[in-house]
Amino acid sequence: MLHRSRLQAFWYKVDSSFWFRPTLMVLAAIALAVTTLALDDYLEDKVLTRIPLIYGGGPEAAQTILSTIGSSMVNVVSVTFSITIVALSLASTQFGPRLLNNFMRDESNQYVLGFFVATFIYCLLIIRAIRVDEIFIPHLSVTIGIILAITAFFVLIYFIHHIASSIKAETLVHIVDKELVKTIEQLCPKPIDASTEEPEPVPDLPEDFEENSAVAPALEHGYLQALEIDGLVHLAKEKDLIFVLAYKPGEYIVQGTPLLRAWPRTSLNRDVVKNVNDQFVIGSMRTPFQDLEYAIHQLVEIALRALSPGINDTFTALGCIDRLGSALALLARRRMPHIAHRDDSGRLRVITHANTFAGAMNAAFNAIRQNSAHNAAVTIRMLEVLQAVAVFVRTSERKESVRRHADMILRAAERNLPEDDDRADVRRRYDELLQMLKRPGIKKSGSVDA
């Protein structure tokens, strides 16, 4: 059975490669060549040559034109690959190697490379079909080849402009921010409201869970990229089990360590362990589609590199903090995913590790705060961003998380900022934030604060 999460992980890997879309375009070029040659064979030369702008020369000239176009495409492909490699090298140095997937997944680059290769393949196929001795001249096919060559000129100009734009810090920050927002919307689709009890209470387990449960070990090692929750629930119902997971997406799994605990232990056998492992998508790297903190860490990494002494680009760091604040404000309006998963009869089957708002706040602010203690602009901007997030927090737990980070930022500023006016600015924004957090919110019980 193909699992949705495994298909997502496979598509993420395919989408990050340079071969997928170019391969599709080469196949399209082959289909186009077959189609145009069939039309050339079906339509008479007299009909085609009467159409304006259709190629009307002889077979030798057609071969020369297509050979020139084909050889030019080989040179252009080598140039575009060289430019791409240089851009990837610069991006890796400036933004970090973990962000290269964002360049690899750039559809524009893949389509440009695919267009050049497809044009080369098309010309080869048409040259092969030209028969000088039988005087078969594929007028339409040669014309299409010329049109593709002219189009390739404009595509090359677009590619150079696109590469120059894509290695700008603002462009990468925007791309990573879009991916973070997409991750939040996928993981947390439901809005939080006054009826929401937050955090979700841990469901009651059987009294003999500790004594009568057994562990299912991991059969491989790597990063947990995704979980197939529906598959785990189905398996637990089929075997009448309860699973308590030991990992959440993004964590590294060591082979042989417990993936989960299963109750009752008598129902856990080798086949069940194998089926359990099939529901865990494990790979060599972290992916963002179920790993909220990884999506946040990509923005944080750009900010940290910008703050490093070798780069010292405060404005890029400020841009990253702004985007983090926007994403956290969105998350503050959403309910976190459930940790308790039940079958269709309402029985508890799976308990997962929770993604929490506090965890997202830690991922967003801890590393930046620790690396910007002497930077007044970054310190003040973090408090301003927390004010923006505070507008949307309603539950007492989320307010406490915002307050905790504000306290840490204030303490760091008072220890490390030498200028009195800078410390006064930090204190003023901190006091404004506290006033915002005092407004009515949602209690844990779901009622509204007085």
Image (spheres, helix red, strand yellow):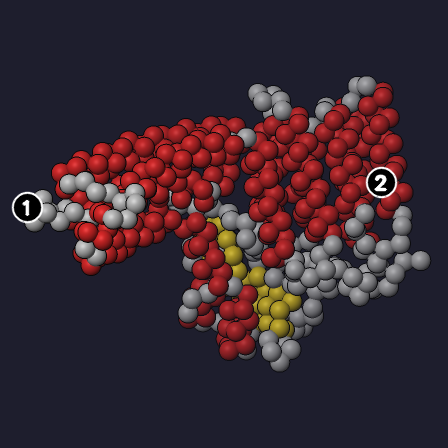
The front one of 47 and 217 is: 47
- Horizontal side of 195 relative to 189 (left or right) equals right
Q: Quadrant of the C terminus?
A: bottom right
Residue toward you, 19 or 36? 36
Amino acid under disc 1? Asp
Q: Residue 41's spot in the image, x, y percent?
A: 18, 56
Nearer to us of marks 1 and 2 is 1
Q: Residues within 10 Å of mark 1 (few under 14, many from 20)?
A: few
Q: Name above or below for residue 376 compared with residue 329.
A: above
For the point 17% across and 37% down, which residue is it? 61
Which type of secondary structure does the marked residue at label 1 adopt? loop
What percent of the width, then of the height, locates residue 304?
Answer: 61, 31
Q: Which residue is mark 2?
A: 433
* Crowding near the residue tagged with mark 2, few <14, some 14–19, many ≥20 C-alpha atoms within 10 Å: many
Percent coordinates x, y for residue 125 in the rendering: 20, 47
Residue pictured at 78% horizontal, 28% vertical:
413
Relative to 238, say whether 88 is above or below: above
Question: Quick check: can you spot residue 137?
Answer: yes
Return the residue at label 1: 133
Q: Between disc 1 and disc 2, whose residue precedes?
A: 1
Q: Is residue 122 left or right of residue 350?
A: left
Identity, as a three-letter code, of the amino acid under mark 2: Leu
* Label 1–label 2 contact, CB within 8 A: no
| Rendered residue at 50%/53% (across/down) | 225
Report the Cα–Cα distance between label 1 and label 2: 85 Å
- View extreme (left): residue: 133
Residue 312 coordinates in the image, percent (x, y): 62, 22
Q: Residue at x 85, y 55 (%)?
A: 441
Helix, strand or loop at label 2? It is: helix
